[in-house]
Image (spheres, rainbow, N blue to C red):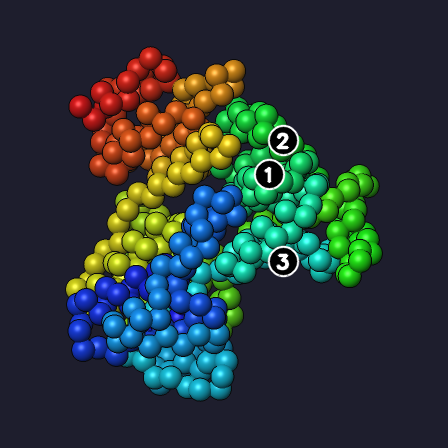
């Protein structure tokens, strides 16, 4: 039984079916669709892909694979001693092996007026539909939050005709959780050049709705410092959170997410976790880790599917993620946490509008690049990805990494 029908859950189901042709497989999802790609939603709202291209599986696929898909249902309780799950329709289902792949739900803004119309989130296909529809009717847009979703909103708003876009973040600078101040300044400059302004160190206190022809809509946003901003549409991206309460009650060990070992096994026999809801033991970097992206969820689904099929498989990867915005690009490779690394080395400049930040750490007697952030330096992405994934000792080249004239391909030659 698999709770969650997105990347990790559906990939695991397909892997199990390929390995165990006669097994019984049931997927439970709280959505009313077959699997679609969340990673394509930003491309959909930018007009880069059609709506139908977002969907990855049709009903016939589940029939062909003999996989039961239960839609619009949530798991409410787990009884591990009896190996059974109670769903929101009141039915109790037995399982032999159970995979938790529930992902996360958006964290809703909890301030007065946050339930007004045109205050939008971006997690589901319906959310994306609403973003497109509302932004096409809006001239001013405000985005709350300084994470990846804020950039998805910003590009989506502008492409769909919103003239004035402002990102409001409580952080000291944009993407402060992911970038250093210099790299952030480049992002801020690139966004500003494309009609998106950044307002830092500010939080929303409340909304003052205005009466439209049919409903109350966004009018004014008042910050905690008493600044008043006018907007027609608001996008909120302040994080996601997995529903873990029913699992905690069942005795599943959790921390920031569901704690697993390198096989994606929880502390309960025959219960596994994968995707955004899993905090797994990362053998690559020797620490507990959460990787919240589509590629990782798919890879974990494949690994845990093999393990659940009887071929116990370690999940081992160095993640990478890339995207474009307003004809610019960014990439995140491996671990980009300064607290984890021993040293961070920059190559590039604010003036040039490009920056690569390389994270170096001594591990197991060698000097390794454990991660990198790359803005508008596409040529750096491939060699850095290879170096990180192959744990190459770069001690001979370390002093050259900050020199833009140094070709990073020499490290892997």
Pointer 1 residue: 158
Q: 221 or 300: which is nearer to us?
A: 221
Q: Quadrant of the N terminus?
A: bottom left
- Gap in angstroms between the C-alphas marked 1 and 3: 23 Å
- Left or right of 179: which side holds 382? left
Residue 21 horizontal/vertical position (percent) = 17, 73
- Left or right of 197: which side holds 360? left
Question: Which one is earlier in the sequence, the residue at label 1 or at label 3?
Answer: 3
- Marks counted in the figure total 3
Q: Going 78% across and 49% down the picture, which residue do you hit?
A: 219
> Can residue 206 be seen by looking at this rendering?
no
Query: Within 10 Å of the Cα at label 2, are there few (<14), some (14-19), or many (20+) other Cα atoms?
Result: some
- Give the SS element for disc 3: loop
- Give the SS element for disc 1: helix
**Is there a contact, CB below 8 Å, between mark 1 and mark 2?**
yes
Question: Which one is earlier in the sequence, the residue at label 1 or at label 2?
Answer: 1
Pointer 3 residue: 108
Question: Which one is earlier in the sequence, the residue at label 3 or at label 2?
Answer: 3
- Give the SS element for disc 2: loop
Q: Which mark is residue 195?
A: 2
Residue 72 horizontal/vertical position (percent) = 48, 74
* Image height of 103 relative to 345, above or below: below
Q: 160 or 391: which is nearer to us?
A: 160
Query: Within 10 Å of the Cα at label 1, are there few (<14), some (14-19), or many (20+) other Cα atoms?
Result: many
């Amino acid at each position: 039984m698999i709770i969650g029908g997105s990347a990790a859950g559906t990939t695991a189901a397909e892997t199990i079916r390929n390995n165990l042709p006669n097994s019984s497989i049931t997927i439970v999802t709280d959505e009313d669709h077959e699997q679609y790609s969340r990673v394509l939603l930003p491309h959909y709202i930018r007009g880069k892909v059609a709506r139908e291209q977002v969907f990855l599986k049709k009903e016939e696929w589940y029939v062909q694979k003999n996989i039961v898909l239960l839609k619009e249902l949530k798991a409410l309780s787990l009884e591990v001693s009896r190996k059974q799950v109670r769903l929101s329709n009141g039915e109790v289902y037995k399982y032999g092996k159970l995979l938790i792949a529930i992902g996360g739900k958006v964290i809703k803004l909890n301030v007065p007026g946050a339930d007004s119309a045109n205050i939008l989130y971006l997690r589901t296909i319906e959310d994306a539909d609403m973003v497109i529809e509302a932004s096409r009717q809006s001239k001013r847009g405000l985005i709350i939050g300084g994470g990846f979703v804020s950039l998805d909103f910003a590009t989506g708003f502008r492409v769909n005709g919103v003239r004035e876009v402002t990102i409001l973040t409580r952080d000291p600078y944009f993407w402060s959780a992911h970038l250093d101040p210099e790299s952030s300044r480049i992002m801020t400059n690139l966004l500003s050049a494309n009609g998106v302004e950044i307002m830092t160190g500010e939080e929303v206190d409340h909304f003052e709705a205005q009466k439209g022809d049919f409903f109350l809509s966004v009018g004014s946003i008042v910050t905690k410092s008493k600044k008043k901003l006018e907007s027609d549409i608001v996008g909120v991206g302040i994080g996601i959170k997995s529903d873990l309460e029913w699992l905690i009650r069942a005795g599943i060990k959790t921390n920031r997410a569901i704690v697993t070992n390198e096989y994606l096994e929880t502390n309960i026999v025959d219960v596994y976790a994968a995707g955004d809801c899993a905090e797994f033991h990362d053998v690559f970097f020797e620490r507990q880790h959460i990787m919240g992206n589509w590629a990782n969820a798919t890879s974990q689904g494949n690994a845990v599917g093999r393990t659940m099929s009887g071929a116990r498989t370690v999940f081992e990867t160095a993640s990478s993620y890339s995207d474009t915005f307003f004809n610019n690009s960014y990439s995140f490779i491996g671990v980009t946490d300064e607290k984890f690394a021993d040293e961070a080395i920059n190559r590039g400049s604010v003036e040039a509008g490009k920056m690569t930040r390389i994270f170096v750490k001594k591990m197991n007697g060698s000097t390794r690049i454990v991660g990198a952030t790359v803005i508008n330096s596409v040529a750096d992405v491939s060699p850095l990805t290879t170096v990180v994934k192959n744990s190459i000792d770069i001690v001979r080249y370390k002093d050259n990494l900050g020199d833009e004239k140094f070709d990073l391909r020499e490290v892997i030659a």
